[in-house]
Amino acid sequence: MSFLYIIVGIKHFVDVEYFVSIVPNYISWKKEAVFISGFFEILLGILLLFHKTRKIAAWGIIMLLIAVFPANIYLYVSEIPRDILNISKIDALIRMPFQIPLIVISYWHSKKISSKIFSKTCIILFIPTIIYFISL
């Protein structure tokens, strides 16, 4: 998970316009929002690597996922970002539910101890989630 967030965070700085295109119009400082969210994805991804900081990183990722969810909604409801990214409304709709397993897996990372069933569920959720995001 940490590498996923670090890589996506780096992409915020490398492919700024991709992320700017899905920032909702009510946010005035689009590039700044992209840089801030990218910075926190990198930081939280790094903090997720270490046992001492894993819990705070996991909760930070949960908050970040909730904070950036309006971009997914905007991508779904607005034709402009879909045209820029060359994706369909169905593709944008498919993207939205992937926030749920990301939140669940982040919550799992926040726990020192979890049941075997919850751990197995998170591992199973991780596989299609990572495959989806790698395919983007």
Image (cartoon, helix red, strand yellow):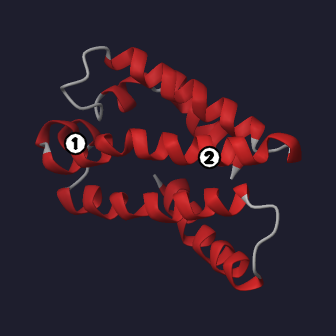
41 and 51: which is toward the camera: 51
Point out the tag, 1 or 2, that comes first from the N-terminus. Answer: 2
**Crowding near pointer 2: few (<14 within 10 Å), some, many (20+)?**
some
Q: Which mark is residue 59?
A: 2
Amino acid type for the residue under numbered disc 1: Tyr
Q: Which mark is residue 74?
A: 1
Quadrant of residue 85 within the rendered picture: top left
Q: Helix, strand or loop at disc 1?
A: helix
Lateral position of residue 17 relative to residue 15, left or right: left
Question: For the point 39% across and 39% down, which residue is it?
Answer: 68
x, y percent for residue 56: 70, 42
**Crowding near pointer 1: few (<14 within 10 Å), some, many (20+)?**
some
Lateral position of residue 30 relative to residue 47, left or right: left
Quadrant of residue 38 within the rendered picture: top right
Q: Which mark is residue 60?
A: none
Lateral position of residue 64 relative to residue 88, left or right: right
In the image, residue 40 sits, relative to residue 122, either above or below, namely above
x, y percent for residue 130: 58, 61
x, y percent for residue 93: 26, 61
Q: Helix, strand or loop at disc 2?
A: helix
Question: For the point 29% across and 35% down, which residue is it?
Answer: 22
Amino acid type for the residue under numbered disc 2: Trp
In the image, residue 35 sits, relative to residue 78, either above or below, namely above
Between circles 1 and 2, the one closer to the viewer is: 2
x, y percent for residue 101: 52, 65
Lateral position of residue 50 relative to residue 109, left or right: right
In the image, residue 38 sits, relative to residue 88, either above or below, namely above
How far separated are the C-alphas under marks 1 and 2?
24 Å
In the image, residue 8 sits, relative to residue 97, either above or below, namely above
